[in-house]
Image (cartoon, rainbow, N blue to C red):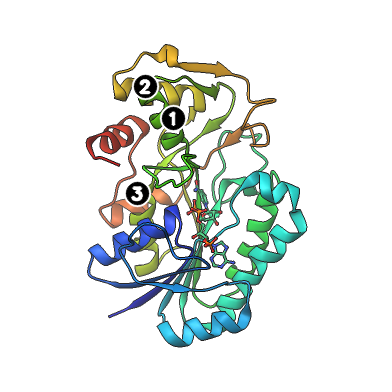
């Protein structure tokens, strides 16, 4: 049985672990702190910025495949500490590719490697990072690309139900759905555009990329290009709540001020990749319906 080491046991890492274990595969999650909630796969302690620890965990897990899906992913934090952000992301990529040179390695990267001026960025679009986070992820991409068997999977904004100890949600769907349900209003920019992808679809595509002959670079964006305001209104619609709970604001000066105007991905490869593997990426309305059918 193949063994997958998932570095990062956060929102996306845990979904990838669930997808793999549901398919009967062996996966191990790794991060510095144990996840608060129960996970689908066993967890090991790892600070992946430490080369010796990476070598120890690789020796222990003996992975055939590695998914790099770790932080820091907070755009604001990276902007405040740009050198540190690059150092952390490049260290993890370098340590894991060196510790397991024979493993197939998949890096989950981001649309922030583009400056956000264009509504469409496919695999042939030249990179021009929007911010320190994008520069750090691009630097990690360059290291992973050099590995013998690797894919960089650039993913657009990911959404789904999310555990939160603090009552703050990082992904936009959860950050809208919870306050809207409590009858509160949410502010959402009308001028920041995304191609959101359901976290379960990200996990399914990641699992497929791990298995199959995949291109070395693949973009994964949802089929809908939508503003955050329209997306928040779609969440309100799904909950049967009035759209007036969504307050349309400009992105300037607000929570998403340092996001590019477009955090959107297109692809000239994804359609065939999904078709050949019987996969589908859901649009926003279907994604919201799917999430509201299950309890968080
Ligand atoms: N969420 C999105 O919309 C999105 C979109 C595109 C790409 N991505 C990429 O996907 C990755 C994960 O995103 P996410 O939303 O799942 O983030 P997340 O929920 O914040 O999870 C990040 C995970 O990385 C771990 N981590 C951080 N530093 C580490 C280190 N030095 N060694 C080992 N583990 C470490 C964290 O745990 P500890 O702090 O306990 O170590 C946590 O488990 C990021 O790299 C991001 O660039 C995310």
Q: Is residue 231 left or right of residue 119?
A: left
Q: Which mark is residue 126?
A: none
Comparing labels 3 and 2, the label whose residue is closer to the camera: 2
Q: How far apart are marks 3 and 2 (CA)?
A: 22 Å
Query: Is tag 2's residue or tag 1's residue first in the polypeptide sequence?
Result: 1
Question: How many numbered discs?
Answer: 3
Return the x and y of residue 109 as percentages of the image width and height: 55, 55
Q: Dot 3: few (<14), some (14–19), or many (≥20) neighbours within 10 Å?
A: many
**Looking at the figure, which quarter contains the C terminus?**
top left
* 59 up-or-down from 237: above or below: below
Q: Nearer the viewer, residue 87 or 10?
A: 10
Q: Distance between the residues labelled 1 and 3?
A: 20 Å
Residue at disc 3, secondary structure: helix
Pointer 2 with pointer 1, Cβ within 8 A: yes
Q: Quadrant of residue 244?
A: top left
Image point (58%, 50%), residue name: 124
Return the x and y of residue 267 as percentages of the image width and height: 48, 46
Image point (38%, 59%), residue name: 14
Q: Name the residue under label 1.
A: 176
Q: How far apart are marks 2 and 1 (CA)?
A: 8 Å
**Looking at the figure, which quarter contains the N terminus?**
bottom left
Q: Which of 189 and 165 is in front in this view?
A: 165
* 172 up-or-down from 241: above or below: below
Q: In this view, does 232 lie to the left or right of 121?
A: left
Q: Dot 2: few (<14), some (14–19), or many (≥20) neighbours within 10 Å?
A: many
- Ligand 1 under 8 Å from disc 1 Cβ: no
Q: Mark 3 points at which residue?
A: 201
Q: Dot 1: few (<14), some (14–19), or many (≥20) neighbours within 10 Å?
A: many
């Amino acid at each position: 049985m193949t063994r997958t080491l998932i570095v990062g046991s956060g929102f996306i890492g845990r979904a990838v672990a669930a997808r793999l274990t549901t398919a009967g595969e062996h996966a191990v999650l790794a991060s510095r702190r144990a996840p608060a909630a129960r996970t689908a796969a066993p967890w090991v302690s790892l600070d992946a910025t430490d080369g010796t620890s990476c070598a120890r965990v690789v020796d222990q897990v003996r992975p055939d495949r590695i998914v790099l899906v770790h932080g820091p992913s907070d755009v604001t934090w990276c902007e405040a500490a740009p050198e540190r952000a690059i150092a952390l992301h490049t260290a993890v990529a370098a340590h894991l590719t060196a510790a397991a040179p024979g493993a197939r390695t998949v890096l989950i990267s981001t649309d922030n490697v583009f400056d956000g001026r264009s509504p469409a960025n496919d695999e042939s679009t030249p990179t021009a990072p929007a911010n320190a986070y994008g520069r750090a992820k691009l630097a990690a991409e360059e290291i992973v690309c050099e590995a013998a068997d690797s894919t960089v999977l650039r993913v657009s904004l990911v959404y789904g139900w999310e555990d939160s100890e603090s009552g703050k949600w990082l992904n936009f769907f959860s950050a809208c759905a919870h306050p809207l349900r409590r009858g509160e209003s949410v502010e959402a920019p009308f001028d920041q555009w995304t191609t959101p992808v359901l976290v379960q679809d990200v996990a399914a595509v990641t699992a497929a990329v791990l298995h199959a002959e995949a291109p070395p670079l693949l973009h994964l964006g949802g089929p809908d290009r939508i503003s955050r305001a329209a997306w928040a209104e779609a969440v309100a619609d799904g909950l049967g709540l009035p759209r007036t709970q969504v307050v349309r604001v400009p992105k300037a000066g607000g929570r998403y001020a340092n996001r590019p105007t477009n955090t959107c991905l297109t692809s000239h490869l994804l359609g065939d990749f999904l078709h050949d593997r019987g996969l589908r990426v859901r649009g926003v309305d279907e994604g919201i319906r799917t999430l509201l059918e299950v309890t968080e």
